[in-house]
Image: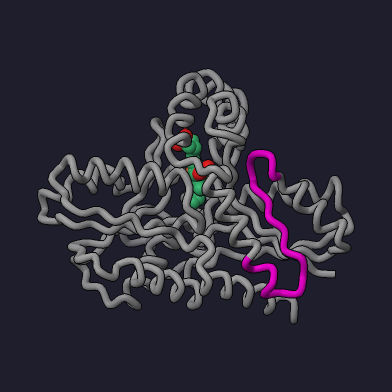
Amino acid sequence: MKGVLLVNLGSPESPEPKDVKPYLDEFLMDKYVIDVPYLLRALLVRGIILRKRPEESAHAYAKIWWDEGSPLVVLSERMQKKVQPLVNVPVALAMRYGSMTIEKGLQELYEKGVTEVLLFPLYPQYAMASTLTILVKAEEIRKKKFPQMTFTDVPAFYNKPDYIKNLADSIQKHLVGFDYDHLLFSYHGIPERHIRKTDVTKSHCKIDGSCCNTPSPAHDFCYRHQCYETTRQVVKLLGLSEDKYSLTFQSRLAGDKWLEPYTDVEIDKMPAKGIKNLAVVTPAFVSDCLETLEEIAMRAKEDFEANGGEEFLAIPCLNDDDEWCQTVGNWINDWVSK
Ligand SMILES: C=CC1=C(C)c2cc3[nH]c(cc4nc(cc5[nH]c(cc1n2)c(C)c5CCC(=O)O)C(CCC(=O)O)=C4C)c(C)c3C=C
Ligand SMILES: [Fe+2]
Ligand SMILES: [Fe+2]
């Protein structure tokens, strides 16, 4: 029997430092996120980052937390509940980090008699810190606990026409009545090193401004190319001119060189360039989360206004948008009928 496991990133149990710390420890000690040898990772994460970050992150989480829990988890659950009636196989939901583990998700499917699983990372663009770590973890658990199961992975859907249409429609809907000067596509950043590591050709990705526009087999796993491609296709559907939009990367950690341009740096400069009304969309995230609700909708808005900006609109993620849930249901049905 077939079944589906939707997997998102996860959140702490609560916005308290005592819950944020173990969550960040699990997240940042993942070798696909901080990709340095174990001892150095432990030194960096436990010796440096986790000394102050849990307090700071807890404060940020407290600002966006809902009565029902973490927005990312609640919105992922709403999506799963909307998708389930559109298909006739069980659809479970898990998180890569935290208590809603991939193991529990697979156990739930196993108890329903599922042996063939569609693994569905809820990330439009591929990155080793998001997609790959889910696939590796799921395979580890399969081997240990569910050897009778088989997996099919849903590849990054950054350029799938129905996803692009859902995203463009949603942007258009949210822009109604907002006389914007500029639309910013802000994607979660990653260290440049990750791009080179996931280059299957070992030589294509130079992050030099042109590699991501030059066709290559590397692009199936190039986060940067995929971000540019999602943007290019959405912009085409929206009919935006070159000067009306731009692309940046947000949420970097100190230390490494992360993908540029940086969202916060670019937003600060926009009012002086005549951009007074700014809309920001965050297509690396399927569900709204700390990085969209706090970093963009609160902090970036304040910074924009402090620098002379007037109106700021944070466009919500696709979340449990009806059309998007229908697309996910269609993809599942296509797989079921194969
Ligand atoms: C879009 C997919 C994501 C990629 C790629 C990614 C890479 C990445 N992230 C960190 C560090 C942090 N990310 C944090 C939050 C966070 N990250 C994603 C998604 C991706 N991260 C989401 C959806 C969220 C929000 C989670 C939520 O509960 O709402 C955080 C925690 C918050 C904070 O302290 O700022 C950290 C830390 C790294 C280092 C990285 C790639 C190397
Ligand atoms: Fe992140
Ligand atoms: Fe590239």
Look at 51% across and 55% down and name the residue there. Answer: 287
Outermost front residue: 67
Q: Which quadrant holds residue 169?
A: bottom left
Look at 57% across and 27% down and name the residue there. Answer: 21
Residue 67 covered by magenta stretch:
no
Report x, y in % for residue 135. 67, 53
Which residues fall within the magenta stretch? 82-100
The correct choice, above or below, for 115 with respect to 7 in the image is below
> Closer to the camera, 213 or 286?
286
Report x, y in % for residue 28. 56, 34
Look at 48% across and 30% down and name the residue there. Answer: 58
The correct choice, above or below, for 57 with respect to 189 in the image is above
Q: Which quadrant holds residue 205?
A: bottom left
Report x, y in % for residue 94. 68, 51
Look at 87% across and 56% down and name the residue there. Answer: 111
* Left or right of 238, for residue 122: right
**Residue 267 in view in this figure:** yes
Q: Which quadrant holds residue 262?
A: top left
Residue 94 covered by magenta stretch:
yes
In the rendered image, which quarter contains the C terminus? bottom right
> Closer to the camera, 264 or 63?
63
Instruction: State the count of labels.
Output: 0
In the rendered image, which quarter contains the N terminus? bottom right
**Residue 338 in view in this figure:** no
